[in-house]
Amino acid sequence: MSQSLTKLTSNLWVYQSELYFTNSGIFLDDGQACLIDPGIFPQEIKMIKGFVGEKQAEPQSLVITHSHWDHILGSEFFPGVNIITQDNYLKEISGGNETHILKQIKKWQTECEVERTQPFEIPKPDQTFNKEMQLSVGNLSLFHAPGHAADQLVVYQADQGVLWAADMLSDLEIPFVSDNLAAYQATLIMLSTFDIELLIPGHGFLTKEKTDIHTRISEDIRYLQELKDKVEQAIRAGFSLQETIEVCSSLQYRHPEDNAGPHRLNVESAYLELGGDADPALVGWNKMDGES
Ligand SMILES: [Zn+2]
């Protein structure tokens, strides 16, 4: 690992993983630390833990922004630290979902040759919330922000205008609508009312530029609205899923060379959500293995 932690504000540091440009946050406040999705590879998590130790801070809470496998790996290195998630996390890690998450982690461990001495256990939260929760460390607010995942949350530090956007508002990715399109749209409308000076996506690069922050939000709102309109029109016209995919190929979105796959999954999931006739076992995000 050649990367290190970057100081962003007087009390926030960020670490970017070499996998999927995934960001981890460390808020330090008066000898206490609040960790956000801390790390993917064991050596990254150890580096974050070492950093907190160097700063002589006590980890108080560990926030898991959502239950996708690449966001839940850090907590086992911080035993006893208060794990916080949104209420839906418990449902998202139970039953068939648990098997799915563990399978994804196994796949990554094999591909990246990550060695373990004991099997990974999905972390259980010590504290959950429904709509909103306040944390004293860093004076943070957590808000339920579904759409990408039913249990997704964002972290907002109002006094500094910092928004930790979980898996949204990336400069690299389009919205991955792997939970619900209507919920994703409502979440973005909520975030568009926040005063944001610093935007940190779960994957990709942060921005402090007002125009960039505004563009990321407005572009994603536009993309989702056009997606909804086009899929709705197609269903009304009696189009098949394949015909709907073709209609939606004219939609504009960022980095089409990288995001054609996620866009297609968005169309498939929207088609199902809006009442189109297709088999959810075969199409859309939820038939997938390995997505973030
Ligand atoms: Zn995710």
Image: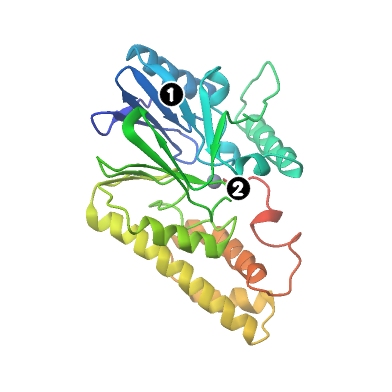
Q: Is residue 25 visible?
A: yes
Please give the residue where the numbered disc 2 appears in the rendered image: 291
Residue type at numbered disc 1: Met
Q: Secondary structure at mark 2?
A: loop
Q: Quadrant of residue 108?
A: top right
Mark 1 neighbour density, 10 Å: few (under 14) some (14–19) many (20 or more): few
221 relative to 197, above or below:
below
Residue at x 29%, y 47% (from the top left corner): 207
Residue at x 57%, y 28% (from the top left corner): 126
Q: Secondary structure at mark 1?
A: loop
Furthest residue to the bottom?
237
Q: Quadrant of residue 69?
A: top right
Q: Which quadrant of the figure contains the N terminus?
A: top left
Please give the residue where the numbered disc 1 appears in the rendered image: 1
Residue at x 51%, y 78% (from the top left corner): 229
175 relative to 34, above or below:
below
Residue type at numbered disc 2: Glu
Q: Quadrant of residue 179?
A: bottom right
Q: Which quadrant of the figure contains the C terminus?
A: top right
Residue 105 is situated, as x and y percent measured from the top left of the image, at 65, 34
Q: Is residue 38 visible?
A: no
Q: CA distance from mark 1 to mark 2?
A: 24 Å
Q: Does label 2 point to a residue whose CB lies under 8 Å from ligand 1?
A: yes
Residue 143 is situated, as x and y percent measured from the top left of the image, at 44, 46
Q: Does label 1 point to a residue whose CB lies under 8 Å from ligand 1?
A: no
Mark 2 neighbour density, 10 Å: few (under 14) some (14–19) many (20 or more): few
Mark 1 vs 2: CB contact within 8 A = no
